[in-house]
Amino acid sequence: MRKTLLTIVLAVLCTPLFANTSLTDGFITGNPEIGTINAMTFGPENILFIGDSQGAQIVAIDMSTAPKATNEKLNIPDVELLLSELLGADSDQLQIIDMVVNPANQNIYIGAQHSSGKSVLFVVNNNSLEMVPLQSVSYTATDVSNAVTAEAKDRRGRSLRKWAISDLKYANGHVMVSGLSNAEFASTFRSIPFPFTQQQDASSLEIYHAAHGKYETASPIKAFTTTQINNESHLIASYTCTPLVVFPLSELKSGAHTKGRTVAELGNWNTPLDIIEMEKEGARYILMANTNRALMKIKVADIESFGNSLTTRVTERADTAGVDFINLPFVNVQQLDKLNDTEFVFIQREASGKLALKTSSNRWL
Amino acid sequence: MNAQSPRFSFASDTLTLKKANGSKKTPFTVYKGAYTTIDQTIHKKAILGEYTQNETTINFIPLLPFQKNSDYTVIYGNEVFPFTIALNPSYKKLAITTLYPNTDTVPSNFLKWYVQFSKPINPTKVYDHITLINNRDGTEVDRALLPLETPLVSDDGTLLTLWIEPGRQKRDLGPNKRLGEVLIPNESYTLLIDKNLKDRQGIPMEMDFKHSFTISNADRKKPSITSWELQPPLANTKDLLVITYKESLDYGSLQNNLQIITASGNIIAGDFTILSNQNSILFKPLNVWNKETYILKCKPIIEDLSGNNLERLFDQDVTTKKMAPILERSFRVE
């Protein structure tokens, strides 16, 4: 008996020392009731974050039990046809909303939306798409409804407002979310600590950007990523009105009027879709997919060396201004993510009109 | 055309097979498209959905409802059954009920429209159906509206926000300097929304929508509530408070950004009706008005048609001194 008691006491005393803490510890199994998939990103430990505008929530799903897909010779020549067949709907009723790669196993996930508003998650496997059911998953979620001004409804009780999540990233223990409002031309950017807590820091940020030092606009951020610039964590964000802007993450404080510094203008009528970072031979590059421009490549070292003159008027080049960027020979790239250290995966509208999923090596960097 | 087999019945959200006596056949598969032989479907993917069964039927519930007037095919053993779900002839087609603003004139730095539809729209590729025409020569204005891959549609799916390309509206940005504003003063334009824009069932509109307007000079002034006219209701009634104003304001930004409070700060329950196309706002109280002084309280993000709000210009000159905005107006109920 005494031995048993000693064992129990020792076990209790030792538990904290041996317990593995995981970011998924507080996850529950069930249905996260995802309304729409608007943006996705992977964090550490196989955690997939989904931005759900309709449900006004960010959902974190543990994907660690998902089997590794077979993605050799990756090439789907007509993703729209495949989706149309699987969902039984015309292509113009379907849209690919986002594509992300799990860095832990290179599984590629695609979020698609039907015009009815229903979203479906797929994983790429053997050059086809397999549906990923979300009715029973290990997950946690946080409410982002206070990012939206309380519901306004018209006389028939219809909701008129919309806060659409435009991009989502995980960095430094935070989930960062940008959003567009259908009512105000304003910036909504939130940085939410993860694991999610009840006492959430209502870190809704006022983010502005200045046009060459004179005019500033509370413009919405469209797409962003995080990277190290001069050994400090920065947000690289692109706006709906073309500038590419950098902020130190340390300046993103709740309630602060944070002004980003413009490093480049990306050209007229162009909204960035995805921004990723790739590395080659010790040099780091930002790759950016855009609605109306080719895939752009920017050397991070150029942004770093541009640092001293960010607040002054930049010299204009042809159609854009700021740091040099190179247009890569990939046009109409609609989705982009890093597949592994040497390859990126992308979905491209080809000259034939077909939407193809392909990969490319970093020889272009 | 419905299936040739009496054993199948079809609805938008279910396909039902009556089991033959003692039948142990594997469930059927359903494909998008009209096929006459099994060979034609060999390289096709079957539609995703769930199968359920009871003693007499096997049911297939597709992940998404079958589209109306579209071809599908069931493969059951060696049998092939093409089918369609017909659209109800009395189906009410999608229409545009209101455009905000619908004024004949907008400033050259005008920022956004809201299009109110009669029912939820298909947001996919919605910009392919919307163009801005210069009425002088009937040509399309190049790159006028900002295409967002996730269009800004209200949660109920009926209100679409259209942004004039903001890079060209903001002073000193490259596109503004090289190309100028999208809209040129004294010119006349037509917003055209073609009838191929569809609803969520995939059914297009009945007809094109056109709205013509002319352009005035840029608006570089913040709106102000000091010039708003408030017509106070009578005490002991539930009469409307009527607010009118001269400068047109942005429909979306007026939603939910207004409040009526008492002098001591208590919120008055009631409903606002935003009649931005008539330059007026109505407030209907839930309870009767008392004989006292009330305050109309506005949030600073209320905008005019050019994105200038009560607090700041769309493109604020950072070298000018900021003034605190006036956000409250009091009125006396007698």
Image (cartoon, helix red, strand yellow):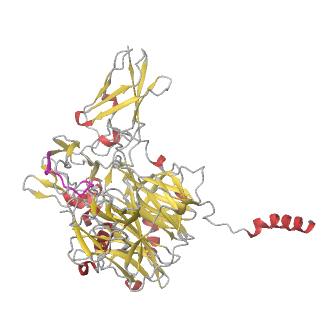
- In the picture, the quarter occupied by the N terminus of chain A is bottom right
User: Looking at the image, which residue is at 43% across and 64% down?
Assistant: A224
Residue A79 inside the magenta-drawn segment: no
> Image height check: is B74 above or below B328?
below
Displayed quadrant of residue B97: top left
Q: Nearer the viewer, residue B238 or A80?
A: A80
Q: Main secondary structure of the magenta part?
A: loop
| Magenta residues, start to end | B199-213
User: Looking at the image, which residue is at 30% across and 58% down?
Assistant: A115
* Residue B300 falls left or right of residue B31: right
Q: Nearer the viewer, residue B175 or A249?
A: A249
Percent x, y of residue B168: 26, 56
Task: Name the residue at the left extreme.
Answer: B137
Q: Is residue A4 visible?
A: yes
- In the picture, the quarter occupied by the C terminus of chain A is bottom left
Q: Nearer the viewer, residue A314 or A189?
A: A189
Displayed quadrant of residue B321: top left
* Residue B203 falls left or right of residue A320: left
Percent x, y of residue B66: 28, 61
Residue B207 inside the magenta-drawn segment: yes
Percent x, y of residue B316: 36, 48
* Residue B271 falls left or right of residue A29: left
Q: How many marks?
A: 0
> Image height check: is A21 above or below A105?
above
Displayed quadrant of residue B101: top left
